[in-house]
C-alpha cells in the first residue's frame, strides 16, 4: 500500500498532503493570510485616499464660503459707497445753505426744520457706519485728506489742518470721499534754473 502511494505520487496522481506542504514550509493558512493582508493593505490605502479627498473637499468648501462672504461684504460696501457718493453733495449743499442763513432768520420754523433734517440725515449716516473726517487741528493724512493749499502759519505745527473746505467721509476703514483741507506749512522754495536767474538779477 505504501509502495502504491509512493508510485502514485511519483506519477502525479495523488495531491500533496498537508504534511508534505508543511515540510516544504508553506501552509494553506499562511498563503490565505498573506492574500488577506495584501487585500487589507489595498483597502486601507483606498480608505486613506478617500479620506484625503474628503479633507481637501472640505477645505475647498470652507475657503469657498469664506471667499463668498468676503465678496458679498465687499459688494455691499461698494453699493453703499456708490449711493453715498451721490447723496453727499446734497448734504454739502444743505450744510452751505444752513451756514449762509442770516442770524435774524435762525428762529424761523422753516430754518429750524432744515436744521432738523440735516441732524436726522447725519444721525442716519452715523447709524450706517459713516463718519465725517477732516477737522481743524487734525494732522494731515494723505490717505484721508486732500490738500488744496499750504498756508504759512506759525501758530500751529507744519502739517496741521487749518481749515476744512469740504468735509470727507469714511465707511468703516474705506474712504468714501477725502476731506478737502488747507494745511499749515511753509511754501516750498523755488529751486532749479529759475532760482538761479532770480539770484543773478
Image (cartoon, rainbow, N blue to C red):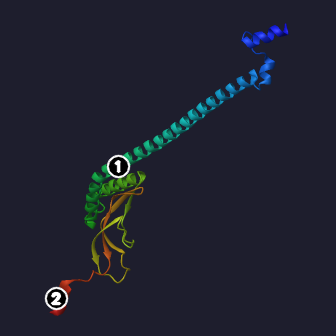
Residue sitting farthest toward the bottom: 200
Q: 118 above or below 144?
A: above
Q: Position of residue 189 (x, y in %)?
A: 26, 83
Mark 1 surroundings within 10 Å by alpha-carbon count, few (fewer than 14), some (14 through 19), many (20 or more): some
The residue carrying mark 1 is 78
Q: Quadrant of residue 108?
A: bottom left
The alpha-carbon separation of the residues under discs 1 and 2 comes to 52 Å
Q: Which x, y percent locates residue 168?
A: 33, 62
Q: Residue at x 29, y 52 (%)?
A: 87
Residue positioned 75% across, 22% down in the render = 29
Image-based side of 77 in relation to 165, left or right? right
Q: Secondary structure at mark 2?
A: helix
Q: On the picture, is 63 further left or further right than 182?
A: right
The residue under the point 76% across, 23% down is 27
User: Which picture quadrant has residue 71?
Assistant: top left
- Residue 165 in picture, x, y percent from top left: 28, 67
Q: Please name whichever residue, 7 or 80, is drawn nearer the observer in this view of the structure.
A: 7
The correct choice, above or below, for 110 with respect to 7 in the image is below
Q: Which residue is mark 2?
A: 197
Number of other residues with Cα within 10 Å of mark 2, as a class: few under 14, some 14 to 19, many 20 or more: few
Position of 23 with respect to 133 (left or right) is right
Of helix, strand and loop, which one carries label 1? helix
- State if disc 2 and disc 1 touch (CB < 8 Å): no
Which mark is nearer the camera, 1 or 2? 2
Measured from the top left, where is residue 110 in percent x and y?
Answer: 28, 55
Q: Quadrant of the C terminus?
A: bottom left
Amino acid at each position: 500500500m505504501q509502495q502504491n502511494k509512493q508510485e502514485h505520487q511519483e506519477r502525479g496522481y495523488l495531491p500533496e498532503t498537508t504534511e508534505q506542504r508543511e515540510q516544504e514550509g508553506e501552509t494553506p493558512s499562511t498563503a490565505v493570510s498573506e492574500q488577506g493582508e495584501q487585500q487589507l493593505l489595498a483597502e486601507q490605502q483606498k480608505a486613506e485616499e478617500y479620506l484625503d479627498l474628503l479633507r481637501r473637499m472640505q477645505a475647498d468648501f470652507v475657503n469657498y464660503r469664506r471667499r463668498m462672504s468676503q465678496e458679498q461684504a465687499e459688494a455691499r460696501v461698494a453699493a453703499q459707497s456708490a449711493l453715498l457718493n451721490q447723496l453727499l453733495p446734497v448734504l454739502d449743499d444743505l450744510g452751505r445753505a444752513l451756514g449762509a442763513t442770516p442770524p435774524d432768520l435762525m428762529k424761523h420754523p422753516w430754518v429750524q426744520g432744515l436744521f432738523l433734517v440735516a441732524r436726522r440725515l447725519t444721525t442716519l449716516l452715523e447709524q450706517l457706519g459713516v463718519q465725517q473726517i477732516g477737522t481743524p487741528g487734525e494732522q494731515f493724512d494723505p490717505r484721508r485728506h486732500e490738500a488744496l493749499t499750504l498756508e504759512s502759519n506759525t501758530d500751529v505745527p507744519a502739517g496741521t489742518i487749518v481749515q476744512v473746505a469740504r468735509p470727507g467721509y469714511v465707511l468703516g476703514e474705506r474712504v468714501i470721499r477725502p476731506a478737502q483741507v488747507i494745511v499749515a506749512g511753509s511754501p516750498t522754495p523755488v529751486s532749479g534754473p529759475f532760482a538761479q536767474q532770480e539770484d543773478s538779477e
